[in-house]
């Protein structure tokens, strides 16, 4: 078995698999090191926004459970309901086991090697990095760390923890037919369902993915708020539910994204959206950016690093910085947020939808805009 590659990718999620697809498509020898056996269940709400789907290099309709061209946003404390609609699906509902496996299989068609049931145990850094796995050593010049929020590659490489990780609970819920019929027609976000957070209802093919998340830093009983959220949705009883807890990094690392020829992407880098905590689209984008950097840099270490940092600095990082500011307004300044939503809610909902659709990015002067709107409203 071949054990030396140009690029080793840790993790077979959307970021790692998309990077592998791009690299192999361009003739760069690539291995995916995955600790589990695919397809495997992955905790995730499974809402894939259109800005990510529109950039996929192949059709994913075979793994889409449902598509929604309308989203509903509720601000419970202010009795506000906002809606946005588009012709294309704003959100596509996927199950990650099927979605991730599809991308991996497409990558394998270009010659990517998949090593399943291989747990990364350590790394020896050098001209060629040696990855020590539970089933033997693999060598590669470059490593893409796409092993998620709690992946160990970044720590092995020397990164400290500078991301803000928020707790979330996700439940795969089977409800009674009348409740499913009623709730299956709507993708909804309920801000204030959780202190400093929100609840979500994502209808899948035959069940609901329901969840709650909090951006606060204090310990919180999310199970309690999940039960209360069921009441908000009008669900009095469930047939079955499967619970999963996870953490979402909603701020990028502050100590860089490349060192020792290791490139951080997706949740490992802290690239989830700070407002919605949606991470699939930015995971894919950053994975592709890392692959493009290696292709354009012709596997020269310095060039690849410079190109990757340039790519994420143009749109992705400024967008995340804006999102972090908006997140503080949304979750920690409730009175200001409700005031703005009552006056400009429809405009805000349209702007958020434009971001979801990939039509626009978050404005970089958002602080100035919000301050001006408040002044205009007061004076």
Image (cartoon, grey):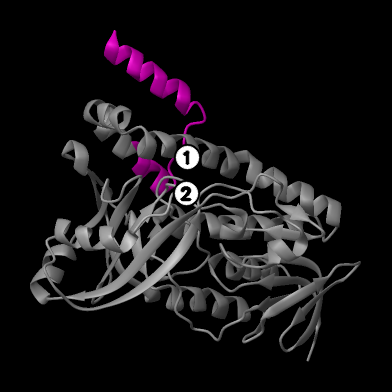
Question: Could you tell me if residue 348 is visible in this image?
Answer: yes
Above or below 252: residue 347: above
In the displayed structure, does residue 298 sit left or right of residue 179?
Answer: right
Q: Give the secondary structure at mark 2.
A: loop
List x then y, in percent, for residue 17: 59, 71
In the image shown, does 328 or 217 lie closer to the viewer?
A: 217
Q: Residues within 10 Å of mark 1 (few under 14, many from 20)?
A: many
Q: Quadrant of the N terminus?
A: bottom right
Q: Residue furthest bottom?
A: 1
Specify the quadrant of the image occupied by residue 13.
Answer: bottom right
- Magenta part, dominant SS: helix
In the displayed structure, does residue 83 sit left or right of residue 355?
Answer: left
What residue is at 71 percent from the left and 46 percent from the top?
A: 255
Total label count?
Answer: 2
List x then y, in percent, for residue 130: 83, 75
Q: Residue furthest right?
A: 127
The residues colored magenta run: 351-379
For residue 323, the mark is 1
In the image shown, does 349 or 147 lie closer to the viewer?
A: 147
What residue is at 30 percent from the left and 50 percent from the top?
A: 194
Indicate yes or no whether the magenta region holds residue 74.
no
For residue 273, the mark is 2
């Amino acid at each position: 078995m071949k054990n030396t590659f140009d690029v080793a990718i840790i993790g077979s999620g959307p970021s790692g698999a998309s990077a592998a697809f791009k690299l192999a498509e361009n003739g760069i020898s690539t291995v995916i090191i995955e600790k589990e056996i695919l397809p495997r269940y992955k905790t995730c709400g499974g809402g894939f926004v259109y800005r990510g789907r529109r950039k996929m290099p192949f059709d994913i309709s075979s793994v889409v459970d449902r598509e929604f061209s309308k989203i509903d946003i509720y601000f419970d404390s202010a009795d506000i309901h906002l809606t946005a609609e588009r012709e294309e699906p704003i959100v596509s509902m996927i199950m990650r086991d099927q979605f991730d496996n599809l991308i991996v299989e497409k990558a394998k068609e270009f010659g990517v090697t998949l090593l399943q049931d291989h747990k990364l145990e350590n790394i020896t850094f050098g001209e060629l990095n040696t990855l020590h796995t539970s089933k033997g050593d693999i060598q590669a010049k470059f490593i893409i760390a796409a092993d998620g929020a709690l992946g160990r590659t970044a720590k092995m490489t020397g990164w400290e923890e500078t991301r803000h990780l928020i707790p979330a609970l996700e439940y795969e819920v089977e409800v009674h037919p009348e409740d499913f019929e009623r709730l299956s027609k709507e993708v909804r976000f309920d801000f204030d369902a959780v202190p400093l957070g929100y609840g979500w209802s994502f209808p899948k093919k035959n069940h609901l993915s329901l969840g709650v998340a909090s951006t606060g830093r204090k310990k919180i009983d999310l199970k309690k708020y999940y039960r209360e959220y069921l009441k908000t949705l009008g669900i009095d009883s469930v047939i079955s539910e499967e619970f999963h807890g996870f953490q979402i990094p909603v701020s990028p690392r502050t100590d860089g994204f490349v060192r020792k020829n290791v490139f951080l992407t997706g949740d490992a880098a802290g690239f989830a959206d700070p407002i919605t905590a949606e991470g699939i689209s930015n995971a894919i984008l950053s994975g592709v950016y890392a692959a493009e950097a290696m292709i354009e840099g012709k596997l020269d270490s310095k060039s690849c690093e410079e190109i990757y940092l340039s790519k994420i600095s143009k749109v992705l990082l400024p967008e995340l910085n804006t999102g972090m500011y908006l997140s503080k307004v949304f979750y920690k300044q409730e009175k200001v947020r409700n005031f703005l939503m009552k006056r400009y809610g429809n405009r805000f909902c349209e702007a958020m939808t434009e971001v979801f659709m990939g039509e626009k990015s978050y404005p970089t002067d958002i602080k100035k805009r919000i301050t001006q709107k408040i002044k205009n409203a007061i004076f």
